Image (spheres, rainbow, N blue to C red):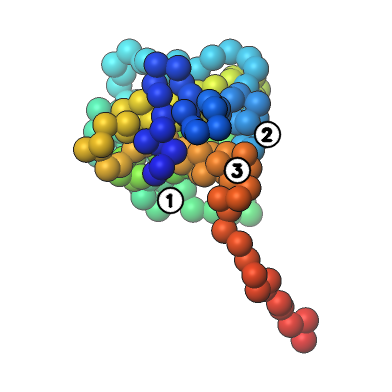
Amino acid sequence: STFIERWRPETHTFHLPCGECTITLEDVQLQLRLPVDGSVLTKSVQSADWRAICYDILGTILDNIYGGWIEMGWLRDTFLEPRNDSTEVERIQYVRAYILEIIGGYLMPDLSRNLVHMRWLLKLVDFRAVGELSWGSTVLETLYLEMYGATPPNRAKMEGCLSLLQSWVWFRFPFLRHRVNHPYIYSYS
């Protein structure tokens, strides 16, 4: 991306002919509706018995856990929509798996876009505490780190919330948006 080429990691800004600009926490809050106030999430976690954690929090055990990473396909296949007669515990487990899919597939995806780390699952134990965490700052930090790593010209892929970067560019630089000259017309018949 042209914007990634203009990223300067030492200042965390894009250097453009018109000046410097950057994605801020306010942008994250406005565009993704994620909380930016509250306790900061840390990515570090002590080595853990991920199989036991998976069973305690999700109620099932995954055979393939790669150093704390689990496959998104397993989440989708294991946690189908809850049935009408499912228990409250099953519904909570479904919600945790669904949020974990959002984290791994949209907010903080890895390069493969198919793995999510179970450290995020540890943050989903108490739903009251989840809303008090600064998810927005973690998403922005992840994107900053990835843009830092993506500045070398030989790097072809990057992790992070690229939709945040794209929506920020379109919001701040409307002349870069796609133009729709022929609006979609739907028949009401």
The image quarter containing residue 167 is top right
Q: Earlier in the sequence, mark 3 or mark 1?
A: 1
| Residue at 25% from the left image edge and 28% from the top image edge | 67
Q: At label 3, which amino acid type do we have?
A: Phe
In space, the residues marked 3 and 1 are separated at their CA atoms by 36 Å
Q: At label 1, which amino acid type do we have?
A: Arg
Question: Could you tell me residue 98's position as x and y percent?
Answer: 52, 42
**Which one is nearer the viewer's eye here, 150 or 84?**
150
Name the residue furthest right: 188
| Residue at 31% from the left image edge and 18% from the top image edge | 48
Q: Is residue 38 visible?
A: yes
The image quarter containing residue 66 is top left
Q: Is residue 126 visible?
A: no
**Which one is nearer the viewer's eye here, 128 or 82?**
128
Question: Could you tell me residue 21's position as x and y percent?
Answer: 55, 27
Asked which secondary structure carries label 2, the reply is helix
Q: At label 2, which amino acid type do we have?
A: Leu
Q: Which residue corresponds to mark 3?
A: 173
Instruction: Please give the label number shown on residue 76.
Output: 1
Instruction: Please give the label number shown on residue 30.
Output: 2
**Which one is nearer the viewer's eye here, 13 or 78?**
13
